[in-house]
Image (cartoon, rainbow, N blue to C red):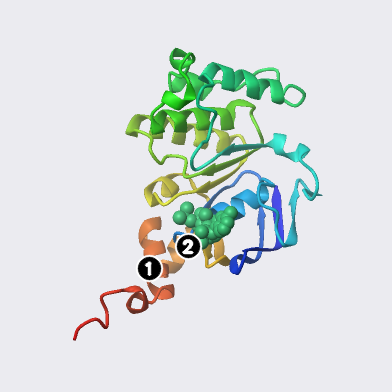
Amino acid sequence: MIRAENIHKSFGKLHVLRDVSVTLPGGRVVAVIGPNGSGKTTFIKTLLGMVVPDKGDIFVEDQSIANRHDYRSQIGYMPQIGKYPTNLKIKQLFNMMADLRRETAPKALDEYLVAAFGLREMFEKPLGTLSGGTKQKVSAALAFLFNPPILILDEPTAGLDPLSSELLKEKIQQEHQRGKLILITSHVMSDLDELATDVLYLQDGSVQFYKSLEELKEETGEQKLGRAIAQIMSKTVSFNNKNPLVGQQS
Ligand SMILES: Nc1ncnc2c1ncn2[C@@H]1O[C@H](COP(=O)(O)OP(=O)(O)OP(=O)(O)O)[C@@H](O)[C@H]1O
């Protein structure tokens, strides 16, 4: 379980997170949704300790993460864009991660995605030579490798081909069935519709709502998450204010 309490974060004058307080329990798949720039990645990074909040605290399994890093072994993280040393081979990256995790890693690694994505056949390839989609596969396989109880996936299916995307979604569903907490940010509403149990909606760095998918669909009268979100966004975003063409007629 993760608990965020009154998280604030600014970059210079830009207030990116405003008083974010949420509890993310085990056994749930929470979709973190919001317009571009609404603070989703920044929020995720505060949970990982990659961004330090200006105010507020985060608890993982009831322990504050302030000035700690050991809790990170409980989290598998798939970044939006994996940045790896270009000359390192896939195999070396996996060995290096296993080495770093030596003390906390389980005896049996979860190599399901390594096999499903055929990564072993590419083990000798340097990371700098991989296509964007293959890099995504490496990031996904690493996130699941140490069988962590919490998974944080930032745009996990972006750049994956349809088969790989299905394989990853199947894996996410399996891990959900095993009671893990899974956080996903994505702009692909159809994926979230299949995977999410709850929706955390951020707008300008504030929590606009946090509710179950079922509740959201019931309230909006929509059967699809995409339509439910579009309905909410159309109420919160003033189209005319954002439309550069409005008011330009002479
Ligand atoms: N390190 C940083 N320094 C300065 N500004 C930053 C930094 N990280 C993020 N921002 C700004 O904070 C805001 C929120 O960014 P963030 O990446 O969290 O949004 P997001 O909701 O994940 O967006 P998207 O949907 O486009 O991925 C943006 O305006 C971004 O430019």
Q: Which residue is drawn at 45% across and 68% down?
A: 219
Extreme-bottom residue of the structure: 250
Q: What residue type is labelled 1?
A: Gln
Q: Name the residue under label 2.
A: 216
Q: Is residue 199 visible?
A: no
Q: Can residue 151 be seen in this view?
A: yes
Return the residue nearer the eye: 120 or 246: 246
Q: Quadrant of the C terminus?
A: bottom left
Residue at disc 1, CB closer than 8 Å to ligand 1 = no
Q: Position of residue 67 (x, y in %)?
A: 80, 47
Position of residue 144 relative to residue 19, above or below, is above
Residue drawn at x 40%, y 75% as measured from the top left: 235
Left/right placement of residue 25 relative to residue 188 reads right
Q: Identify the residue shown where x is 70% and y is 58%.
A: 53
Mark 2 vs 1, N-terminal side: 2
Q: Nearer the viewer, residue 142 or 211?
A: 142
Q: Residues within 10 Å of mark 2 (few under 14, many from 20)?
A: many
User: Which of the 4 image quarters holds residue 92?
Assistant: top right
Indicate left or right for 21 with 87 as reference: right
- Of 211 and 34, nearer the camera is 34
Q: Please state the horizontal and vertical placement of residue 91, each as a whole percent of the image.
A: 54, 16
Q: Name the secondary structure under disc 2.
A: helix
Whether residue 104 sits left or right of residue 184 in the image: it is right
Alpha-carbon distance for marks 2 and 1?
A: 11 Å
Q: What x and y, as percent, mark residue 130?
A: 41, 26
Horizontal side of 65 relative to 22 (left or right) equals right
Return the mark for residue 231. Answer: 1
Q: What secondary structure is found at the residue carrying circle 1? A: helix
Front residue of 61 and 179: 61
**Image position of 152 with respect to 73: above or below:** below
- Residue 159 vertical position relative to residue 28 in the rendered view, above or below: above
